[in-house]
Image (tube, helix red, strand yellow):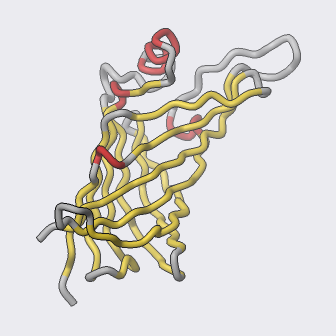
Amino acid sequence: MATTKWILDPTHSELQFKVKHLMITTVTGSLKSFSATLSSNEDNFTNAEISFDGDLNSIDTGNTDRDNHLKSADFFNAAEFNSMSFKSQSVEQDGNDLTVKGDLTIKGITKPVTLAIEFGGIATDPYGNTKAGFTLSGKINRTDFGLTWNAALETGCVMVSEEVRILGELQFVKQA
């Protein structure tokens, strides 16, 4: 089988994270700048190879002070570790559902993660480009990656949850 290479279409893709704040509400942020590639056997994504790189200086939560705090040494230390990356180790496909296992690296710390991905299908755009769409979801524990800043509250809770939900809408363009 021939190997097909797919490159992320950044204008039709988004990557978000969601974290509990004060343990009562959820704050949503996104990476505004990231890239990804996907290599597969034709249009079958079983055993595909996936790689991702995200610019941590592009974090956007809609609040400049919070964004600057996330980029600081308290969290991502983006001055020293300006990107995060992911490289798949295995991809299993069951119909439109994929399970992707791979290594996520944040702040120089690499840990295994499992992501659930829903394959949305393949379509040709008006310009003749073949595109594949995916919806991604997963969870990580931020402290596993050295993101340990927190503050205890009088209520016995903490300011920021350890669990971070990852959500993505990703569109890839098939390369000739």
Report whether 107 appears left or right of 147.
Answer: left
Instruction: Check the image and report above or below for 107 versus 131.
Output: above
Percent across and percent down for residue 120 are 46, 68
Q: Quadrant of residue 31?
A: top left
Q: Nearer the viewer, residue 45 or 134?
A: 134
- Furthest toward the front, the residue is 126
Q: Residue furthest left?
A: 176
Give the answer, above or below, for where 172 lies relative to 60.
below
Q: Is 59 left or right of 146, judged from the image as shown?
A: left
Q: Position of residue 57 (x, y in %)?
A: 33, 25
What is the tally of numbered marks visible in this picture?
0
Report the residue at 29% width, 65% height from top.
131
Q: Position of residue 163 (x, y in %)?
A: 65, 40
Q: Position of residue 75 (x, y in %)?
A: 49, 23
Image point (35%, 46%), residue name:
85
Residue extending furthest toward the bottom:
1
Q: Residue at x 56, y 40 (%)?
A: 144
Q: Nearer the viewer, residue 164 or 11?
A: 11
Side (left or right) of 6 relative to 108: left
Image quadrant where one finds the C terminus: bottom left
Q: Quadrant of residue 80?
A: top left
Which image quadrant: the N terminus? Answer: bottom left
Tell me if 175 is positioned left or right of 35 in this view. Answer: left
Against 127, residue 58 (above or below) is above
For the point 50% across and 72% down, the residue is: 98
